[in-house]
Amino acid sequence: MSADAFLSTWAALTKELTELIDAALDVEPPGGLPDSWAARLKSLGVAPLGEDARIAAIKEHQQTRGAPLPEVSACLANFTMLAKKQLEPLRKTLTAEQARAMEDGVHRFTDQALGHYRAKATEKKKGMFGAAKALAAQHQYGKGLNATAYVLGCSACHAPRLADELSCAFCGGSLEVVS
């Protein structure tokens, strides 16, 4: 297997793993067993949990979305074994150290995927405007400590200067510097 074949196989495994995690996160209601998730479980040789076990797992891990964590963990374990089989032809062309690094990479990759899934599945749901409030709280232009521009504004109504006159176009008041 050449380097190009390895890279294409690794890319395919990465895509497959991403699709697996996305499918697990898409399970609604949390702990449910829609047909799409049941098909994923079957394709990876994982038996679905019983109804009571599903509910208990969701409560135990405090999941707010997705498939039960034990099912996802079992899917990732089986996925790791399948990935090793797909990468096995490459092992013959590698040194012992490179082969260990490849195997370690596969394990690390699936462990990180499980950590990502756990974080997303237990993420607390924000209110309807939660994301908007968080974005509004961020100041986009720095601290504003060193202002480089000034605006002339009315001391009475605080309207900005719109023309060359030194009196307010709205109320006729005098203009002052506002940064």
Image (cartoon, rainbow, N blue to C red):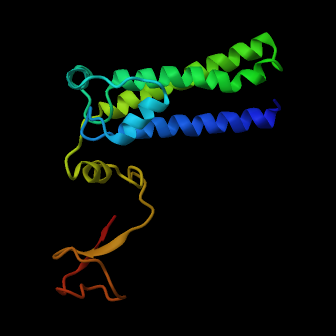
Quadrant that contains the C terminus: bottom left
Residue 152 falls left or right of residue 112: left
Number of marks in the rendered image: 0
Residue 167 x/y as whole percent = 25, 86
Is 58 placed above or below 138 here?
Answer: above
Is 103 placed above or below 11 here?
Answer: above
Residue 129 visible in the snapshot: yes
**From this viewpoint, which residue is outermost toward the top?**
96
Depth check, front residue: 121 or 52: 52
Q: Residue at x 34, y 24 (%)?
A: 69
Residue 150 falls left or right of residue 128: right
Residue 48 x/y as whole percent = 34, 25
Q: Residue at x 53, y 25 (%)?
A: 79
Q: Which quadrant of the view contains residue 33?
A: top left
Residue 111 visible in the snapshot: no
Quadrant that contains the N terminus: top right
Is 123 placed above or below 71 here?
Answer: below
Residue 112 x/y as whole percent = 50, 25
Residue 96 x/y as whole percent = 78, 10
Q: Which quadrant of the view contains residue 100?
A: top right
Q: Residue at x 41, y 51 (%)?
A: 142
